[in-house]
C-alpha cells in the first residue's frame, strides 16, 4: 500500500467515523479537531482493519503520542514495513 493509498484511507476514516472533513495533514488533531483518547482507540481499531492485523500493546502505546495525519501515515508505513520484514524473515527460516 502506497502512502497516497494510506492517506486516502485515513482521510475517509476521519470523514466517516469522526465527521472530520479535510483535516490538514499537519493539524494537531487534539487541538484543532478535539480528537480525544476515545477517538484514538477507535482510530487504532480502524488501523487494525486497514492492515488486516491486530496491533500489539507496544504498537498501541507508541501511537499515543501521535498528533497529526502525517504522523499517522508515518506510523502505518512503519507498521507495514515491520510486518513485511517479519514475514520475509519467517519465510527465510
Image (cartoon, helix red, strand yellow):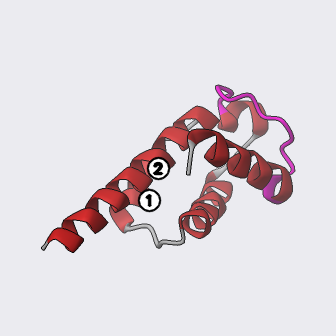
Mark number, residue 79: none
Circles 1 and 2: CB distance less than 8 Å? yes
Q: Residue at the spot x=59%, y=62% of the render?
A: 41
- Above or below residue 24? Residue 76 is below
| Side of 36 where 89 appears, left or right | left
Quadrant into which the C terminus falls: bottom left
Residue 68 seen in this snapshot? no
Image label count: 2
Q: Magenta region: which residues? A: 17-28
In the image, is 82 to the left or to the right of 89?
A: right
* Relative side of 27 to 57, left or right: right
Q: Specify whether residue 41 is painted magenta.
A: no
Secondary structure, mark 2, is helix
How many residues crowd around disc 2 within 10 Å: few (fewer than 14), some, or many (20 or more)? some
Q: Label 1, label 2: how many angstroms apart (C-alpha)?
A: 5 Å
- Residue at the (16%, 69%) spot, across then down: 92
- Compared with residue 13, is residue 22 higher up or lower down, i.e. above or below? above
The percent position of residue 38, horizontal first and vertical second, equals 65, 60
Q: Is residue 26 magenta?
A: yes
- Image height check: is 58 above or below 67? below
45 versus 77 height, above or below: below
Of helix, strand and loop, which mostly describes the magenta segment? loop
Front residue of 27 and 7: 7
- Foreground pick, 19 / 4: 4
Residue 45: give x, y in percent of width and height: 60, 67
Q: Callout 1 environment at 10 Å: few (<14), some (14 to 19), or many (20+)?
A: some
- Residue corresponding to mark 1: 60
- Circle 1 sits in a helix, a strand or a loop, which is it? helix
Mark yes or no: residue 12 visible. Answer: yes
Circle 2 is placed at which residue position?
A: 63
Location of residue 39 (image quadrant): bottom right
Amino acid at each position: 500500500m502506497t502512502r497516497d493509498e494510506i492517506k486516502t484511507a485515513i482521510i475517509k476514516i476521519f470523514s466517516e467515523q469522526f465527521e472530520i472533513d479535510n483535516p490538514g495533514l499537519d493539524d494537531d488533531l487534539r487541538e484543532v479537531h478535539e480528537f480525544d483518547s476515545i477517538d484514538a482507540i477507535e482510530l487504532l481499531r480502524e488501523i487494525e482493519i486497514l492492515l488486516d492485523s491486530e496491533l500489539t500493546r507496544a504498537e498501541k502505546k507508541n501511537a499515543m503520542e501521535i498528533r497529526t495525519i502525517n504522523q499517522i501515515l508515518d506510523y502505518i508505513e512503519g507498521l507495514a514495513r515491520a510486518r513485511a520484514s517479519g514475514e520475509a524473515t519467517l519465510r527465510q527460516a
